[in-house]
Amino acid sequence: MLFSRIWVLALTSPLVFNGVLSFPQPIPLNDGDAPKELLGDLLTVGVRTTTGQAVQNILLGLESGQSAVVVDQASACAAQSVCCVWYSVATDLTKLFLARDGTCNDDARAAIRLGFHDAGTWSKSNKAAGLDFGGADGSILIAAFEEQNRAENNGLQTIIVKMQKLATKWKVGLADLVQYAATHAVVTCPLGPRVRTFVGRKDATQPAPPGLLPSVHALSGDLIALFQDKTIDPHTLTALVGAHSCSKQFNQDTAHPGSAQDSTPGVWDVNFYNETIATKPNKKLFIFDSDKVLAFDARMATEWRAFISDQAHWNEDYSAAYVRLSMLGVNNINDLTECTGTLPAARQKFP
C-alpha cells in the first residue's frame, strides 16, 4: 500500500521550484534496482512535507532525481525565499568551474569529490551503535576538525579553502554548500545531469567518523559492503562510480600527476565505463584498481556495460544515486527546501 500511495503522489502532486510548478516525471521502468531504503527522518517519523515526499519518492525510485525545470531569474525570487542567495552562489561557482573551452575544470572535479567525501562519512552500523553523525554535514569544511589533513582527503585542500571563502561571503551553510557545489559542478560539465538539489541541512558539531571512505586498492566485495552500509546497493554504486568520468588523479601515481580516468575528463560522458574495461587500455589514462574490480564484479557488471551506450540511462541513475548520497546523515529532510531552479541548465549536446 505504501508504494502505491507514493506512486500516485509522484504522478499527481506538483512540486514548487522558486514559484514554478513542475509535475515530476515517473521513471518509466525499474532497470534492476533492489528495493530501496529510506533515510533520516523519513525513516523515523515519515513524510511531513512536500519536500519530504519528493525526496522519499526519489529514494524509492518513484520520481526522477534530475530536473528540467526552467532556470529562474534571480530578480524573480520571492524576497523570503531561502533559495535567493543560491543564485549568487551559482554565479560564483560557474566562474570557478567552467573552463574557457566550455568543459568543466579541475575545481569542478575537486568539488564533485568533495561532495562524495563529506557525505560518505556515515554508515548504518554507526547509527545502530548510537553514532548517528557524519554524512552530508559540512564537517570537511570546518578547519578545527582537521578533516582536510586526513590521508583520504589529500588533494582537496585547495577546494576546501575556496568553499570556506564562498560560505563566508554568502553566509550559507557549510553542509549545503558542499552538496550544492557538487551538483553545480556536475551540471557545469557538458552532458551532465541537473541533479535535484536541496538546502537546509544542519552543519556538523563534531568531526566525521574516520575510516568510512573507500580505498582505491580495496577488493570489490569490501567496497560493495562499505557502500551497502550506507544504503547504497551495487546497482546504485555502479552509477556513482561513473563520476570518475570527470576525475583526475594527483596522489596515486605521483610520477604522472593529473592523469585522467577517461579520455574526456572535461565532459560528463560514458567513455569511462568503456575505457575502464578496455582489453587494450589507453596508456595515457590512470585506471583505479577499485574501478577495475568493480567493473568485473557480477553484481555490477551488467549495469556497468549498460551505461556504455546509454548516456540518458546513466544520467538518470546517477541523479537518483546522488540525491541519496547527499541525504546521508541528514535527519531533517522534511525541513529542506528544493533550490534546483538556481542551478544552470543542463547541456545535452557538446560541442
Image (cartoon, helix red, strand yellow):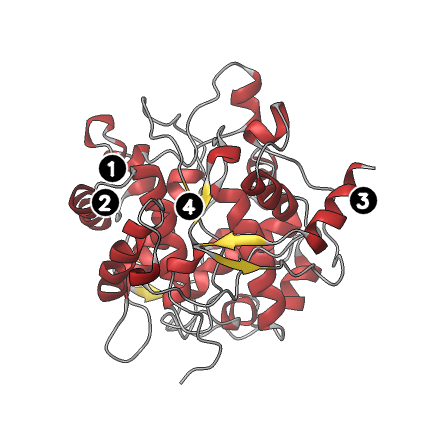
Contact between labelled residues 3 and 2, with CB atoms less than 8 Å apart: no
Contact between labelled residues 3 and 1, with CB atoms less than 8 Å apart: no
- Going by the picture, which residue comes out furthest to the right? 1
Closer to the chain start, of discs 4 and 2, is 4
Q: Nearer the viewer, residue 217 or 6?
A: 6
Label 4 secondary element: helix
- Mark 3 or 4: the one toward you: 3
Using the rendered view, name the quadrant where residue 157 is placed.
top left
Closer to the chain start, of discs 3 and 4, is 3
Mark 1 to mark 2: distance in Å? 8 Å
Q: Which disc number belongs to residue 4?
A: 3
Closer to the chain start, of discs 1 and 3, is 3
- For label 4, the residue is 116
Closer to the chain start, of discs 2 and 3, is 3
Contact between labelled residues 2 and 4, with CB atoms less than 8 Å apart: no
Residue located 20% across and 48% down the image: 166
Mark 4 to mark 1: distance in Å? 14 Å
The percent coordinates of residue 347 (x first, y second) are 44, 75
Closer to the chain start, of discs 1 and 2, is 1
Label 2 Cα crowd, 10 Å radius (few <14 / some 14-19 / many 20+):
many
Label 4 Cα crowd, 10 Å radius (few <14 / some 14-19 / many 20+):
many
Mark 3 to mark 4: distance in Å? 32 Å
Label 1 Cα crowd, 10 Å radius (few <14 / some 14-19 / many 20+):
many
Label 1 secondary element: helix
Q: Which disc number belongs to residue 160?
A: 2
The quadrant in which the C terminus is found is: bottom left
Q: Amino acid at mark 1?
A: Gln
Q: Amino acid at mark 4?
A: Phe
- Mark 1 or 3: the one toward you: 3
Label 3 secondary element: helix
Q: Amino acid at mark 3?
A: Ser
Q: Is residue 76 left or right of residue 17?
A: left
